[in-house]
Image: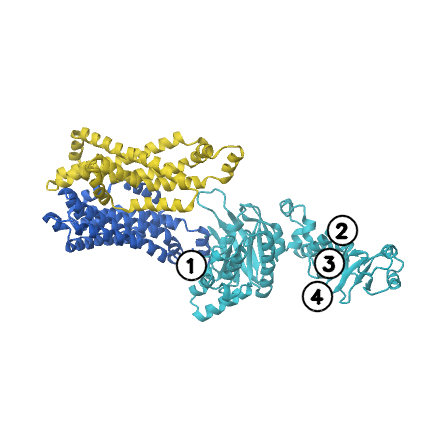
Amino acid sequence: MPALLAAVLLALYLWVGSQTLDSIERARVNLDFILSATSRHVQLTVVSTVLVLLIAIPTGVLLTRSFARRISPPTIAVFNIGVAIPSIGLLALFSVVWDIGFWPAVLALVAYSALPVLRNTMVGLQQVDPTVIESARGMGMSKLGVLARIELPLAVPVILAGVRTALVINVGTAALATFINGGGLGEIIITGIGQNRQLVTVVGAVLTAVLALLIDYLAGLAEDFLRPRGL
Amino acid sequence: MSEFISYLESHWDDLLELGIAHALVVAVSVAIATVIGVALGIATYRTERPRELVLAITGFFLTIPSLALFGLLISPLGLGWPPVAVALVMYALLPIVRNTVVGLREVDPAIVESAQGMGMGRARRLLRIELPLAWPVIMTGMRVSTVIVVGIAAIGAYVNGPGLGEDIFRGLRRIGNPETALNLVLGGLLGIVVLAILFDLVYVLLSRLTTSRGIR
Amino acid sequence: MTIKIRLENLTKRFPGEREPAVDSLSMEIPEGEIVILVGPSGCGKTTTMKLINRLIEPTSGRIFLEDEDVTKVDPDGLRRRIGYVIQQIGLFPHMTIYENIATVPKLLGWNRAQISARVDELLTTIGMDPATYRSRYPKELSGGQRQRVGVARAMSADPDVMLMDEPFGAIDPITRDRLQNEFLRIQSEIKKTIVFVTHDIDEAIKMGDRIAILRDHSHIAQYDTPEAILVDPADDFVAEFIGRGAGLKRLNLSRVNDIEMSECATVQAGADRDEVRRALGETDRCVLVLDEQRRPRRWVNADHLELVGGRSLTEIGLPADAVVRPYSTLSDTLNEMLVADYATAIVVGDDGVYQGVIDIDTINEAVRGMRAAERSRLADRLGEGG
């Protein structure tokens, strides 16, 4: 995968190098701008994903505790409707009712991508073999001990899959952050589309796609690395 | 709140029109994706290498951010319906292919063998036994695809695609006028949510009508 | 006899259920014995067991562990003092065998060297080489090995009391038999107090020092030694639960060395015909031919000697089948006889050397004797009570 992505970037570089650029094109297709847009894009993705982890995993844990057994089905039903909200609509809503810029974009990303992590945390915890939990309790582990040493480690593969999904969603949705002045690689794409400069559009689109695929690839590596052995 | 309701009353026709266009592009895309996806699933579910290749490629599509894909598609296809429909088909493929493969592979081999033992040929077995048994799983894939595609279609409005995304982008352009902007954005957003729920109901109905009562 | 566990009017009502699952159960469990809770499914035996380590909290009643009322103590601390094995074993799949067994010692704050030594000791006890198995994961073990590790894990902190819920239930019959024997061997050394739940009366008879037969709501139908229950079932429920095979099941309770062996005529394989005839004497019975190491070879009678002229003694007569050991159960002995179609079984030591014979009448007499002895013991007990 990394080789393929590098080849795509090289091809893009050679193709752009063979073209003569006008001033609009030069304003977007230059190394400085590309690097700052990329770093902004990565910031949007990473910050929102970290926030998602901090919010969704504890919430998922709480919703699977025995005291929450009553409220968890309706909560999940509400969340399932939430999946239908379009990402661009959420960004637009945040910008209209709050503000434009980096943080509204981040929070819109969080709201949009928290669901898969939350759902996978709950599913991951619920699918832990109840007899394993019973034997841990029977050996005198406290509830917190069972959660930390048995349930969460056993749920890790499923939770990680959710985190990877959230990362991919975030890197894709971060491309839309530019619509509310949040920056990122989407800025290059919409300049190209808006100013009718195909070269700019293609550069922005290819860079965004390459970044998304790279992040997905790295998340896949992390997933393999973090999965507990023995499973 | 009351302002939004009066906005809805006065713009009902526009919203309905956009909603129908939105539903249409989604339905067409999912239909095309189903034909392609089920065909790919049937062609590859028995052989490991091609199956994994098809799943990897369709998974690769789903990883490409939508704005980037639209950007790449407008060069060859221009603005409007075509790039949006093509992109939506690409996004809808993975869940359908994957569920077709899973559904077909989950069919009890004993059933297939007994069909074979009764003298059913390969094609007849597929059509009369395997596909009907896998159908509920395939439908679930279509349902997942539809939810994904309904949301992405909204972004298609930026490249002049049809649908409720148009109101969301109009709202974004009027951000200086928060009231109008909010009405436009909320109208588009809620319209899409309602549409997604309606699609879900259609799937419930469809699965009742098309799934054998024996396996429901 | 010291009482290790005492249950006093223990009751459990689950919310939303009209009838209590366990209804005012009182029983005493003696130290160092295996007490079996057995009964039809739904009788509350598993619930009863889980009340003891308070995985299920009792609605009312009290639990005493060595005269200490543990009904209200910290349940986690209580459970660390009690070994626990369930049918599904519940090994932690993400932990190695070492980490699984080390769980409770770690909770109790043992130091690393202590834990390591203890794990190795336990693995050796259950017949699994520590060097090979310490760092394996549960999925890399067979079902029988996992069950052994489950038992080792329950014994890790050397608890006095162990609770076992159908521990051999999910294992194939041959492995189950081996694990049961292995467990009985270990128990004869460690002498834990064990509460053991099963629905299988044969397992109960084999494993139990004492059996509590439970009916609905964990009411005790009979609580006694296996012998007493088999000889004198308290009521129709118990009799039916034991089943029609009670007489045969009794044969599982005594072993060959519990009853008197008889001698039969023997000759060495090299003996001549006259010697054999002398050994046979006037009877029409058989003589047992032994080889130089005194291991049984053939059964020979007078007719065999007449029929075949010059052949050696190890080539004529019938093969000396139906061979049992001193510790074989009478049930196994009878089975050997039926398989070989002889009325006599030969008893040999572990070295294969002839010790004596048992015939079918001896077994019959033994059973009759057992029944009489049990009857008089019961009569004594009733007399004392009255």
Q: Residue furthest bottom?
A: C113
Tell me if residue B14 comes above or below residue C296 in the rendering. Answer: above
Is residue C223 visible in the rendered image? The answer is: no
Residue under the image location 68 percent in, 61 percent down: C327
Separation (CA) of disc 3 from disc 1: 51 Å
Q: Secondary structure at mark 3?
A: strand
- Mark 4, residue position: C351
Query: Residue at the location (15% across, 51% down)?
Result: A29
* Dot placed on the residue nearer the N-terminal end, 4 or 3: 3
Expressed as whole percent of the image width and height from the top left, the position of residue A7 reads 26, 53
Kindly identify which chain the residue marked by label 3 belongs to: C
Residue at the image point whose x is 20% and y is 50% from the top:
A15
Colour scheme in use = by chain
Q: Please, what is the three-letter code of the amino acid marked with disc 1?
A: Met
CA separation in Å, label 4 and label 3: 12 Å
Q: Label 2 near label 1: C-beta < 8 Å?
A: no
Q: Residues within 10 Å of mark 3 (few under 14, many from 20)?
A: many
Tell whether label 1 touches label 3 (CB within 8 Å): no
Find residue C216 and report its horizontal and vertical position in percent: 55, 45
Q: Colour of chain B?
A: yellow
Q: Distance between the Cα atoms at labels 4 and 2?
A: 25 Å
Q: How crowded is the residue under tag 1: few (<14 C-alpha within 10 Å), some, or many (20+)? A: many
Q: Badges 4 and 2: C-beta atoms under 8 Å apart? A: no
Q: Give the Cα distance between marks 3 and 2.
A: 12 Å
Q: Colour of chain A?
A: blue
**Could you confirm whether marks 3 and 1 are on the same chain?**
no
For residue A205, the mark is: none
In this view, A217 is above or below A95: below
- Chain shaded cyan: C
Three-letter code for the amino acid on which mark 3 is drawn: Val
Q: Tell me if label 4 and label 3 are in contact, CB under 8 Å.
A: no
Q: Secondary structure at mark 2?
A: loop
